[in-house]
Image (tube, rainbow, N blue to C red):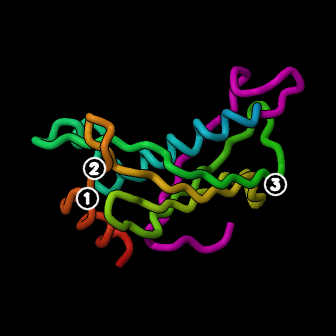
Amino acid sequence: MSEQNISDHNIKVRVYYEDTDFSGVVYHANYLKFLERGRTEALRALGATHAELLDQEDPIVFTVRHLSLSYKAPARIDDLLIVRTRFTAAKGARLFVAQSIWRDETCLTEAEVEVAAMALSGRPRRLPPSLLALLQVANS
């Protein structure tokens, strides 16, 4: 793996039987689950949890607005993967995230994700200043 940016966050994910198709290769949609776990744990590492964001006076949730995904090599049953997550920008209600999934020195998947902050009503909502402050600290 190349040298990490200071704001990179990594989690380990083991590939289980339930993640694979009949041939022991990870089913393509399961990469989305691995990436979601990476974003959630990266937020947690910054000091923000989904539960806390929901518990605010003006609660927010996140929804994926746009996702660009490139599959480069397959993951297989019992592989130990690293999901790398980096918050690259925040603008208005949008948070931009670069993610990749690695097995040892091999990049298996790369993703560019645009996440939108939403009120519980489903309307877009600006990212809270507290979260923006955490993101700025991570990217400094």
Q: Is residue 80 left or right of residue 61?
A: right
Percent coordinates x, y for residue 125 in the rendering: 27, 51
Residue in view at x 26 percent, y 35 percent: 120
83 to 86, vertically: above or below? above
Proximity of marks 2 and 1: CB atoms separated by less than 8 Å: yes
Q: Please report the bounds of the magenta region as a residue range.
A: 1-26
Residue in view at x 45 percent, y 72 percent: 6
- The crowd level at tag 3 (other Cα within 10 Å; few <14, some 14-19, many 20+) is few
| Residue pointed to by mark 2 | 48
Dominant SS in magenta: loop
Closest to the observer, 25 or 82: 25
Can residue 27 be found in the magenta stretch?
no
Quote the CA–CA distance across marks 3 and 2.
31 Å
Mark 2 or 1, closer to the camera = 1
- Indicate the amino acid at tag 1: Leu
Q: Secondary structure at mark 1?
A: helix
| Residue pointed to by mark 1 | 131
Closest to the observer, 124 or 18: 124
| Residue pointed to by mark 3 | 72
- The crowd level at tag 1 (other Cα within 10 Å; few <14, some 14-19, many 20+) is some
